[in-house]
Image (spheres, rainbow, N blue to C red):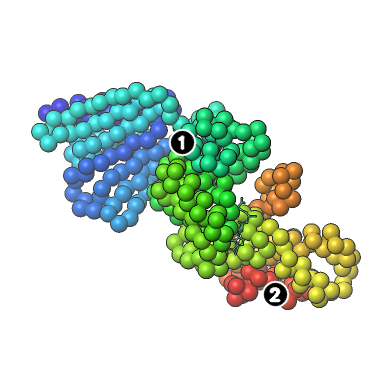
């Protein structure tokens, strides 16, 4: 029959789009091959050590497996699959959709349709867009009063919109480090009105083209009801908001844990949930640091540098640094690689430090070193306990 010929045409379309950087994604379905559990294969372009590669997600009945290949390797595999194993393949490029199908009669067809507008996934070489979240066609941005119905950002929401994009920009590079594929489970602890939760879901789903399951955890029932309504309006099937406390949330299976400006020790509760869940990425922007401030004030240790905590403003800043420094050490104790940096200009908020933990390997030596530093810091500043250290039981 004509299967080989139509398969060759699809492969030629793929090769051309890959070479001229218009490839968006390819999916294979209606599997008839020897693997009883395989259902689909989804293909996207990724950069690995700055080299373009194809990331293939093999969707089985109960799990996903991801493998990366060069374009040459992939083309060989695609030839075999189209000729023998899959009856449907859809290639999406920036300008067209091409559908290959083998019908029950054994005859193959190839249908090509032009598309008007399509965004390039961020892992491509396209650097022309500065904003990862575009304001157009985003019902959630309208519902959150960031844009009007035509997708124009309101004058008084420009700062918020920039902040959302800046946050996604930072998260995008952190997410790339942990390279999730297929299904990814995210918890946003203390999600508030959900500006960032919606944007993160949008980014994971529509830019990275993952299968995100995002939960916003929030104890204010009015915000939870509002956010769930907005999520439904947006058709975000994998985004839900749960009413409850961070402490009580069951984070098992969470790959990425986020907590932005969760008050005082709620940040510790969130970090601990991430550690317990073995999350690949933990990102927190702490808010107030009252617990450690009270500890320092209570014990009033006298040493050569106690002048640094004598004045209220210095005490506040010391409490902030000591609290977050110990948080980073606790993460390191559990094998996380940590980074602490400023993430937005303090024109927006003075609470602008981000603590990032990326899961690595736990070693006894690193554990002992982190533990010793925590003990020394506590002794130096007269701290009986740090909330996260207590939760972690170290
Ligand atoms: C300052 S807002 C930040 C909202 C959002 N993360 C952001 O950055 O835009 C903090 C939110 O966390 C919620 N929150 C604080 N502690 C919490 C806890 N222990 N459990 C659940 N929600 C909490 C508050 O109700 C509030 O909505």
Residue 55 image offset from top left, x and y in percent: 39, 42
Q: CA distance from mark 1 to mark 2?
A: 46 Å
Residue farthest to the left? Answer: 105
Residue 15 image offset from top left, x and y in percent: 35, 28
Q: Mark 1 sits on what residue?
A: 121
> Measured along the vertical axis of the image, is residue 70 above or below residue 112?
below
> Residue at 59% across / 66% down in the picture?
269
Look at the image and tell me whether residue 249 can be seen: yes
In the picture provided, is 93 more to the left or to the right than 79?
right
Look at the image and tell me whether residue 329 can be seen: no
Residue 110 image offset from top left, x and y in percent: 23, 27
Picture mark count:
2
Circle on res. 289: none
> Measured along the vertical axis of the image, is residue 219 above or below residue 392?
above
* Viewer-closest of 193 and 364: 193
Residue farthest to the front? Answer: 222
> Residue at 68% across / 45% down in the picture?
344
* Viewer-closest of 134 and 172: 134
Q: Mark 2 sits on what residue?
A: 385
Quadrant in which the C terminus is drawn: bottom right
Where residue 365 sits, quadrant-wise, is bottom right
> Measured along the vertical axis of the image, is residue 235 above or below residue 79?
below
Quadrant of the image where one finds ligand 1: bottom right
> Residue at 68% across / 71% down in the picture?
386
Q: Residues within 10 Å of mark 2 (few under 14, many from 20)?
A: few
């Amino acid at each position: 029959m004509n299967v080989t010929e139509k398969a060759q045409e699809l492969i030629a379309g793929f090769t051309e789009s890959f070479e001229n950087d218009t490839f968006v994604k390819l999916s294979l379905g209606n599997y008839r091959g020897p693997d009883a559990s395989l259902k689909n294969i989804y293909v996207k372009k990724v950069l690995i050590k700055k080299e373009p590669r194809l990331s293939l997600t093999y969707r089985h009945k109960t799990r996903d497996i991801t493998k990366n290949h060069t374009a040459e390797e992939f083309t060989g595999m695609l030839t075999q699959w189209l000729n023998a194993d899959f009856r449907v393949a859809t290639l999406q490029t920036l300008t067209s959709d091409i559908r290959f199908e083998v019908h029950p009669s054994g005859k193959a067809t190839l249908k090509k349709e032009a598309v008007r507008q399509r965004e390039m996934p961020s892992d491509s070489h396209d650097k022309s867009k500065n904003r990862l979240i575009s304001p157009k066609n985003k019902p959630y941005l309208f519902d959150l009063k960031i844009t009007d119905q035509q997708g124009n950002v309101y004058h008084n929401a420009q700062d918020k919109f920039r902040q959302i994009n800046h946050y996604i920009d930072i998260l995008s590079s952190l997410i790339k480090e942990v390279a999730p594929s297929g299904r990814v489970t995210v918890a946003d602890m203390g999600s508030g009105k959900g500006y960032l939760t919606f944007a993160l879901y949008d980014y994971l789903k529509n830019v990275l083209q993952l299968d995100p399951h995002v939960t916003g955890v929030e104890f204010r029932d009015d915000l939870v009801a509002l956010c769930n309504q907005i999520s439904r309006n947006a058709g975000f099937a994998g985004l839900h908001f749960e009413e409850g406390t961070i402490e009580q949330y069951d984070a098992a299976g969470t790959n990425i844990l986020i907590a932005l400006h969760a008050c005082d020790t709620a940040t510790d509760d969130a970090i601990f949930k991430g550690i317990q869940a073995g999350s690949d990425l933990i990102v927190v922007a702490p808010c107030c640091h009252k617990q450690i401030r009270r500890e320092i004030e209570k014990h009033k240790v006298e040493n050569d540098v106690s002048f640094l905590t004598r004045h209220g403003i210095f005490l506040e800043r010391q409490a902030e640094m000591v609290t977050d420094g110990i948080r980073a050490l606790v993460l390191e104790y559990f094998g996380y690689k940590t980074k602490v940096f400023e993430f937005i200009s303090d024109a927006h908020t003075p609470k602008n430090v981000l603590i990032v933990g990326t899961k690595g390997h736990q070693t006894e030596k690193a554990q002992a070193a982190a533990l010793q530093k925590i003990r020394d810091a506590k002794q130096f500043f007269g701290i009986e306990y740090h909330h996260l250290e207590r939760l972690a039981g170290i």
